[in-house]
Image (tube, rainbow, N blue to C red):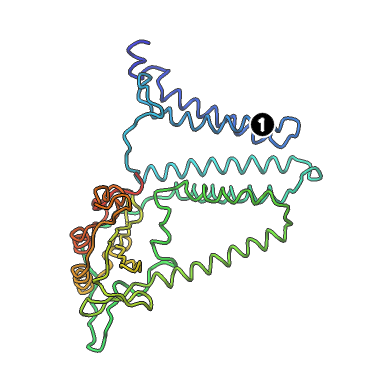
Amino acid sequence: MDADDEKGGGLLKPTVVGLALALFSAALALTAIFLIADPRIGVLAAVMLSFGCVGVAAGLVLTRRRSWADPSWPPDMESKPWSTRRTRRVSFLYGVFLLLISVGGVVTLVGADQNETDDPVRGWVLVTVLALLGSALIIRGARREQEAVHSSDRPESEPIVDAQEWVPLGPSRTHGLFPWWALRVFSGQPLLVPMVCAFLFPVTALRLGAWTWLFGAVGLAVAAVIVSIVVRRRSRPPCISRDATRLLVGAREIPTASITTAMVIAGPWEPDATARNLAIVLTASDHTRTVVGLRERGRLALTENQTELLMAAIERADIVLPHDKDDPRGRFSRMLYPNHLTKTEALQLVREPPGDGEALPVGSAST
């Protein structure tokens, strides 16, 4: 092997070979999808599909190899945090992949003899789900990122009435139908939703009629509405007493001195994300948890008075990093619980919540 090959250069460098392998394997897998419905070569097509999927994965891993001289496998590459551009690109490509599979399924179903098809409804349900997932990922990957928000202005404080016992920690209603932390659960994980939905595909093997599928879809829609109502009700901001000694979470009242842990959540997690949402999660000793929004779409959510009360509550709390049962001294707490905060970090986060382009005091969930 010459010096050019050792450096990974030339036409046979790992990136070129890996890309060629991934494209060839993808073409092999797509061809197998068209042939798998033929009973004469169905088994061979299934084997082709398996090898094609493995080849795509191996080719993509190979593209990350710096040179052929590197003996490690998978390639020992330094992990980099996901950027918004990378997230959109992966979402778009994966959406195209799912859409192509759906188109291949439609061609197969249209070309097959409906009398010989075991249950055409199952096939149409499967390709419809794949088409919807693919289209959603393509739309997400193609849309433009919002402009960065640089704002340090807090909302105007409302006057506190003498008879007012509780002060809400944040606006009474969010700007959207759902709270941001419910919508952004899968932020930075563009492939997680299709992977979760993939577990539902075995349901298509059941012999169900068209009306059963229709009633099932209606049932899922009703369940989604019920879940959204429950999530919206639970997303109402907590209230704090005027002396910062108690928190009101729903109908439960907890003393601020019982708060033991604080955790930061953000959406999206990408370091270069714009219009980012930020919140702190406080957990009491009885496992009661409350979410207090600090930034909403890049803008500060708490007034000066609300910020002072929340900081006073944290001052009264005994916040420490969680300890694993196998790590009683907490030597690895920072590694095991990267999103948790110390008391000092929690106070700093509430006092000056990081905005767009500013680093979070914890590790990224997308790395």
Which residue carries the number 1 mark?
45
- Which quadrant of the view contains residue 156? bottom left
Give the left or right position of residue 337, taking residue 94 as reference: left
What residue type is disc 1 on? Ala
Q: Residue at x 39, y 49 (%)?
A: 188
Considering depth in this image, is 330 or 194 the residue closer to the camera? 330
Quarter of the image that includes the N terminus? top left
- Residue 169: x, y in percent? 29, 73
Q: Residue at x 43, y 31 (%)?
A: 61
- Residue 310: x, y in percent? 23, 70
Residue 290, compared with residue 115, is above or below; it is below
Tell me if mark 1 has few (under 14), some (14-19) or many (20+) residues whose alpha carbon lies within 10 angstroms of its own. Answer: many
- Residue 124: x, y in percent? 68, 49
Considering depth in this image, is 329 or 144 the residue closer to the camera? 329
Q: Residue at x 60, y 34 (%)?
A: 30
Q: In the structure shown, which secondary structural element does the residue marked by tag 1 occupy?
A: helix
Residue 364, compared with residue 97, is above or below; it is below
Quarter of the image that includes the C terminus? top left
Q: Tell me how many marks there are.
A: 1
Considering depth in this image, is 205 or 358 the residue closer to the camera? 205
- Residue 34: x, y in percent? 67, 35
Give the left or right position of residue 343, taking residue 335 as reference: left
